[in-house]
Amino acid sequence: MKKTLGIIGCGAMGRLIGLHVQKELSRYYELRGVASRSREHAEHLGGELGVPAMETEEVIGLCDVLVESASAAAMPGIVRACLAAQKEVLCLSVGGFSLDPALLDEVQAQSCLVHVPSGAVAGLDGIRAMREMGLESLSLTTVKRPESLGLADLSALPPAGETFCSAQARLVFEGSAAEAIRLFPANVNIAIALSLAGNGFEQTTVRLIADPGAKGTRHFIAARAGTCSLETTVCPAPLRENPRSSALAMYSVPALLRQLASPLRLAG
C-alpha cells in the first residue's frame, strides 16, 4: 500500500527529491504536497511537480511521511510539529540537533519515527557497530575550497599540515562537532550525522581546512575502537543546481525511502 509523502523545503534538494520520488519511487509513495517558508518557492515547485503548495502544518496533517529539507534553524520546529502529529519524518538538516540539543530527548520520548539519512557519509553502519564495541575516537577532516567557506584571505590562518592538501591549505577550525555546527552551519552537517552514529557531538572531533588547490570537497573519516579502525574518504559530487550541495546527500534520501518501503532491511 502506498504512503503519502510531503516535502518541507523547496530548494534544490527538495526539488530533486520530489522529482526522483515521482520517477523512481511512485510504486511506494504518492507525493501529496510541498511546503516552504517562502510561499512563492512552494508554488513554483508545486507547479513543477503537479502537487499543491501548502502550509507546513497542512502538509504534515495530510501526509504519512514527511521529508524535511528546509534549514538547520527551521528543522527543530518542523520535527516537533511532526512528533505532535505522530508523523514519520526524514531530516536532511541534521545540524538542527546540535543547535537544539533538547530535541534529541524529545525524539527519544516519542513513539513515531525520526530518520536521519546517511547524507554524504559512507560507513555510518560501521560507526554504529564500533560504538557498540566501545568507540574511543571519531574524527572528521573536511577540505573545501576557500570560496565555499566564504573566505577570501587565508593569510592569518595556520598551515593545515596535511599531506593530502596543497602547501597553500590553511586550518580554519579544529574542535568538537557541537562547536563546528554553531560556527559553520552550512558546511558541517556530515559531522552531525557522524556524531549521532557515534558518541555524540562533544566527543566527535572536526577539522575544517580551506585549500585553494582542492578540486572539490573531500571528507576524511577516522574511527577507532580497540584494535578495530575505520578510515573512509568521501568526495561527494555537487548538485548541478546548487554547487554547495552534495548529490550523494540528496540521493541518500530516496535510498532511505526505498529501504523503509522494502520488507528486506539492509543494515546500512
Image: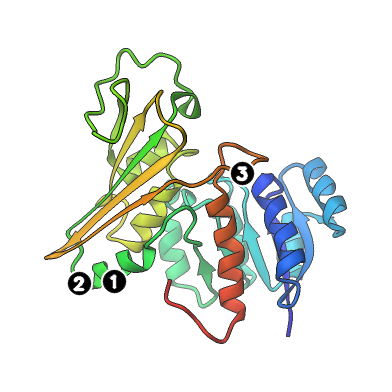
Residue depicted at x 48% and y 50%: 96
Q: Which mark is residue 133?
A: 2
Residue 80 in view (yes/no): no
Residue visible at 32% across and 20% down in the picture? 168
Q: Is label 2 in contact with label 1 (beta carbons under 8 Å)?
A: yes
Percent position of residue 259, x then y = 56, 75
Viewer-side residue, 74 vs 204: 204
> For this rendering, which residue is in front, 111 or 114?
114
| Residue at the (61%, 70%) spot, across then down | 257
**How many numbered marks are there?**
3
At mark 1, the secondary structure is helix
Kind of residue indicated by mark 2: Met
Q: Is residue 51 visible?
A: yes
Q: Along the horizontal axis of the image, is 201 left or right of 99?
A: left
Three-letter amino acid code of the residue under disc 3: Leu
Q: Nearer the viewer, mark 2 or mark 3?
A: 3
Three-letter amino acid code at disc 1?
Ala
Going from N to C along the chain, the mark reached first, 3 or 1, is 1
Residue 194, by quadrant, is bottom left
Residue 237 vs 103, above or below: the answer is above
- Quadrant (top left/top right/bottom left/bottom right) for the C terminus: bottom left
Earlier sequence position, callout 2 versus callout 3: 2
Q: Decide: is 228 above or below 72.
A: below
Q: Secondary structure at mark 2?
A: helix
> Residue 170, position in %: x, y?
31, 24
Relative horizontal placement of residue 98, taking residue 249 as reference (left or right):
left
Residue 120: % across, % down: 47, 52
User: Real-space Cα distance between discs 2 and 3?
Assistant: 36 Å
Query: In the shown orientation, is residue 192 left or right of residue 31?
Result: left
Q: Which residue is mark 1?
A: 129
Report the residue marked by disc 3: 239
- Where, by quadrant of the figure, is residue 125 drawn? bottom left
